[in-house]
Image: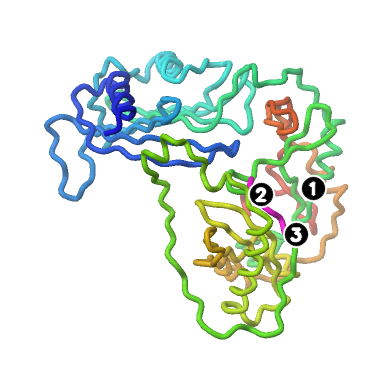
């Protein structure tokens, strides 16, 4: 075992009261966080002394699986197998009173309750906390989960995401009043067609697309697309060819394992998904996607367009969408071609046509009668505007914004206000 890993393991044993446990496995994996940074995690598996190892290779009850940030030493996750905590009990809190739980989390993470996280949900045996600054939520934020068994023993702790402190915040009082955000609601109101399964037809509905509005109401900040889409290179090119290609396309092997070696972790090498696509790679992908389409979809010339590429799990993902099919596009039906980055060769693909096919027999939507202005007027009482600190890449800080959202839509034919999650 690497000496640095051994020291970290000894710290974990001491911190988490695993003195009567043996470290039987450890391994590393890496991922990309919301800020496009590489995070290396050391996973350790601690089996109770004298426990019998099952023949199927699984861990026995009471095994502690602990994830640690390899470069900061922060504990990210503690899971006790089969809901059995076999560690030193004095190290862990009991669920009542919950102030003990909060103090334990503060000691373990270095965070401050109220200033950096708050209670989001409580259940019989678990508590969920969300990132917040002075009790105001943040985005992107973080989540903390703790769970207990029937004996009041902690069996799960996990922390994910980001918990900014006050120095990362540009403080200002919340100033978004209805006269400022309602004009934005008009801009965010869109007519879409949604499947009504009860009637087996498409329903034209006006809905408000959720967004963040800066405190001065001068601009919006879109919701995060996800770590993989930070590398997205947008395209809008119709794919055409005069003749299909002969031959057979064969898929290749994919390696989606996040595991890495200790040498890679120690070197803190950047995740491949954080290395931007080059112009040459994008051009090579365009040629490869065209070759793929000529082989696999030979009759689709002029019916599809290439909408972009992005990085995911070390591969390049190319997205292909139907042209002129509003329903398919609103369902976000795409062909996703997986391209090996080293060779720019397509090795797999995922066609979402099955999703589209489930609705193809639905009747077409009726023509909209309600105007967008009227729809916003109907939705005005249902608009939600909540203060939230949002990371702004222009400022490199979290800034005060309002989160505009609406759980309701307007039937564009009848004018009825409907709850969107009922469709």
Residue 377 is tagged as none
Q: Quadrant of residue 168?
A: top right
- How many labels, in total? 3
Q: Cα distance, mark 1 to mark 2? A: 14 Å
Q: Name the residue under label 2.
A: 420
Residue at 38 percent across and 39 percent down: it is 263
> Which contiguous range is marked in magenta?
230-235
Residue at 30 percent across and 17 percent down: it is 91
Please, is residue 402 above or below residue 288 in the view? above
Of labels 1 and 3, the one closer to you? 1
Residue 204 is tagged as 3
Residue at 23 percent across and 41 percent down: it is 59
Q: Earlier in the sequence, mark 1 or mark 2?
A: 1
Q: Can residue 338 be seen in this view?
A: no
Q: In which quarter of the image is residue 240?
A: bottom right
* Helix, strand or loop under label 3: strand
Residue at 28 percent across and 23 percent down: it is 10
Badge 2 crowding class, 10 Å Cα cut-off, few under 14, some 14 to 19, many 20 or more, is some
Between residues 358 and 251, which one lies in front from this camera angle?
251
């Amino acid at each position: 075992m690497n000496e640095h890993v051994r020291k970290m393991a000894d710290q974990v044993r001491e911190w988490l009261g695993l003195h009567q446990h043996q470290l039987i496995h450890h391994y590393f994996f890496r991922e990309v966080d919301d800020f496009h940074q590489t995070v290396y995690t050391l996973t350790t598996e601690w089996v109770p002394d004298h426990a019998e190892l099952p023949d199927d290779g699984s861990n026995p009850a009471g095994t502690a699986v602990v994830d640690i940030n390899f470069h900061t030493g922060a504990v990210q996750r503690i899971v006790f197998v089969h809901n059995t905590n076999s560690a030193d009990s004095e190290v862990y809190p009991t669920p009542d009173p919950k102030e003990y739980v909060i103090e334990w989390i503060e000691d373990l993470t270095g965070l401050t309750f109220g200033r950096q996280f708050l209670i989001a949900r409580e259940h019989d045996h678990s508590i969920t906390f969300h990132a917040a600054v002075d009790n105001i939520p943040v985005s992107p934020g973080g989540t903390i989960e703790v769970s207990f068994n029937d004996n009041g023993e902690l069996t799960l702790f996990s922390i994910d995401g980001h918990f900014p402190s006050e120095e990362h915040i540009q403080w200002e009082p919340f100033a978004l009043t209805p006269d400022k955000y309602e004009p934005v609601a008009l801009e965010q109101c869109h007519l879409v067609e949604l499947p009504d399964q009860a009637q087996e037809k498409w329903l034209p509905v006006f809905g408000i697309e959720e967004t963040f509005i800066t405190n001065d109401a001068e601009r919006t900040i879109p919701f995060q697309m996800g770590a993989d889409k930070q590398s997205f290179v947008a395209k809008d090119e119709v794919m055409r060819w005069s003749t299909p290609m002969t031959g057979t396309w064969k898929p290749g092997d994919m390696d989606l394992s996040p595991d890495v070696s200790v040498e890679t972790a120690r070197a803190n090498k950047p995740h491949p998904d954080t290395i931007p696509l080059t112009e040459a790679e994008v051009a090579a992908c365009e040629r490869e996607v065209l070759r793929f389409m000529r082989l696999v979809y030979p009759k689709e010339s002029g019916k599809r367009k290439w909408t972009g590429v992005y990085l995911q799990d070390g591969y390049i993902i190319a997205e292909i969408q139907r042209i002129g099919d509003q329903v398919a596009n609103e369902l976000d039906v795409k062909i996703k071609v997986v391209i090996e980055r080293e060779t720019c060769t397509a090795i797999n693909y995922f066609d979402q046509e099955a999703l589209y096919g489930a609705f193809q027999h639905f009747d077409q939507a009726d023509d909209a009668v309600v105007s967008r202005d009227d729809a916003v007027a109907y939705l005005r009482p249902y608009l939600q505007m909540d203060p939230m600190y949002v990371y702004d890449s222009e400022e490199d800080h979290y800034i005060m914004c309002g989160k505009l959202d609406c759980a309701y839509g307007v039937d564009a034919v009848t004018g009825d206000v409907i709850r969107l999650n009922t469709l």
